[in-house]
C-alpha cells in the first residue's frame, strides 16, 4: 500500500502507495556532500563541514526531530538499535532536504515508541518543500501522516486509488476485499507466487 498527501495533487503511501508533492525545493548541497553524509560517521561529517551554517542546520534538525546529541558522536549506524538507525535516517533526510522522498517500510522492526518518533519527524519534514511517498503494510505511520491519496498495488500495478479511508479499510480488513474486486490481478499475483515457490524448491 502506498499513501501520500500534497499541497496540490498527490499523497502518502501505505502496502499501498501514494505521494505528497512538494513545492520548490532547496537542496542542501551537492552530490559530494551527500556521499559524505552516507559514507562517513556523523562526527567526521561535522569536522569536515565545520562551518557555523552547517552546525546551525544540524542542531536545528536534531532539536526538531528530538535526536539525542550523543548519537552524532558515534560512527553512523555502528551499534545503533533499529529505532536509532531510523532516527538518523530521518535526520539525514532533514539535512539533505530532497524535493521528494520515497520511504519503503520505514516502520519495519520498530517498537511503538520508535514508530511514533519517526512518524512525528516525517510529519514535521513533509510539506510544500518536500513530497513524500510512504510504502507500508501497516497503518501506524499514517496516524501522524494522514494520506491525501492511497494507492493499492496488486500484481505489479495500481488497481485502486482512494484517500485515507482506503488505507484504514486495508488496515481493518486486509487485502481480501481488494482481491475480490480485482480477480484477474489476484490470479496473476497468485500465479507469480506459485512460480517463485516452484523455482525455490
Image: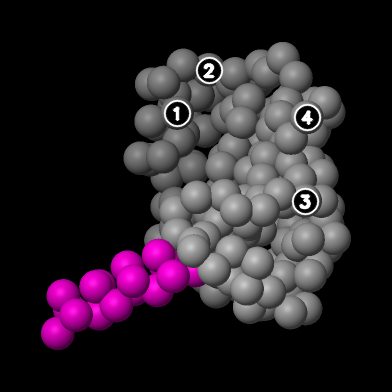
Few, some or many C-alpha atoms within 10 Å of disc 4 (few <14, some 14-19, many ≥20)? Answer: few
Q: Quadrant of the C terminus?
A: bottom left
Q: Earlier in the sequence, mark 3 or mark 1?
A: 1
**Magenta residue check for 187:** yes
Mark closest to the chain's N terminus, 4 or 3: 4
| Callouts 3 and 1 close, C-beta under 8 Å | no
Q: Is residue 189 above or below residue 106?
A: below
Using the rendered image of the protein, determine whether residue 62 is visible from the camera's viewpoint.
no
Where does label 4 land, which residue? 9
On the picture, is 11 further left or further right than 71?
A: right
Pick the front one: 122 or 54: 122
Q: Is residue 131 inside the magenta stretch?
A: no
Whole-percent x and y of residue 83? 60, 67
**In this picture, is 81 found above or below 93?**
below
- The label nearer to you, 3 versus 1, is 3
Q: Secondary structure at mark 2?
A: loop
Going from N to C along the chain, the mark reached first, 4 or 2, is 4
Q: Is residue 132 left or right of residue 120?
A: left
Label 1: state its secondary structure. Answer: helix
Q: Disc 2 to disc 1, how far (Cα)?
A: 7 Å
Residue holding disc 1: 34
Earlier residue among tags 2 and 1: 2
Q: CA distance from mark 2 to mark 3?
A: 36 Å
Task: Say what secondary structure mark 3 lies in.
Answer: strand
Identify the residue under disc 2: 29
Which picture quadrant has residue 138? bottom right
Which residue occupies 40% across, 31% down? 36
CA gap, disc 4 and disc 3: 13 Å
Residue under numbered circle 3: 162
**Residue range of the region highlighted in magenta in the rendering:** 186-201
Whether tag 2 and tag 1 are in contact, CB under 8 A, the answer is yes
Q: Position of residue 109 (x, y in %)?
A: 55, 74
Amino acid at each position: 500500500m502506498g499513501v501520500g498527501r500534497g499541497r496540490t495533487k498527490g499523497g502518502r503511501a501505505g502496502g499501498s502507495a501514494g505521494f505528497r508533492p512538494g513545492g520548490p525545493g532547496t537542496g542542501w548541497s551537492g552530490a559530494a556532500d551527500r556521499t559524505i553524509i552516507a559514507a562517513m560517521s556523523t562526527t567526521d561529517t561535522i569536522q569536515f563541514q565545520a562551518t557555523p551554517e552547517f552546525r546551525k542546520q544540524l542542531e536545528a534538525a536534531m532539536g526538531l526531530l528530538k535526536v539525542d546529541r550523543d548519537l552524532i558522536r558515534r560512527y553512523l549506524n555502528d551499534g545503533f538499535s533499529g529505532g536509532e538507525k531510523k532516527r538518523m535516517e530521518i535526520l539525514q533526510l532533514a539535512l539533505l532536504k530532497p524535493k521528494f522522498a520515497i520511504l519503503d517500510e520505514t516502520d519495519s522492526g520498530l517498537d511503538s515508541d520508535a514508530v511514533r518518533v519517526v512518524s512525528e519527524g516525517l510529519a514535521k519534514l513533509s510539506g510544500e518543500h518536500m513530497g513524500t511517498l510512504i510504502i507500508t503494510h501497516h497503518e501506524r505511520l499514517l496516524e501522524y501522516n494522514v494520506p491525501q491519496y492511497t494507492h493499492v498495488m496488486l500484481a505489479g500495478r495500481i488497481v485502486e486509488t482512494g484517500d485515507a479511508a482506503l488505507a484504514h479499510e486495508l488496515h481493518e480488513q486486509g487485502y481480501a476485499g481488494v482481491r475480490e474486486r480485482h480477480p484477474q490481478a489476484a490470479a496473476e499475483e497468485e500465479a507469480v507466487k506459485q512460480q517463485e515457490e516452484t523455482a525455490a524448491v
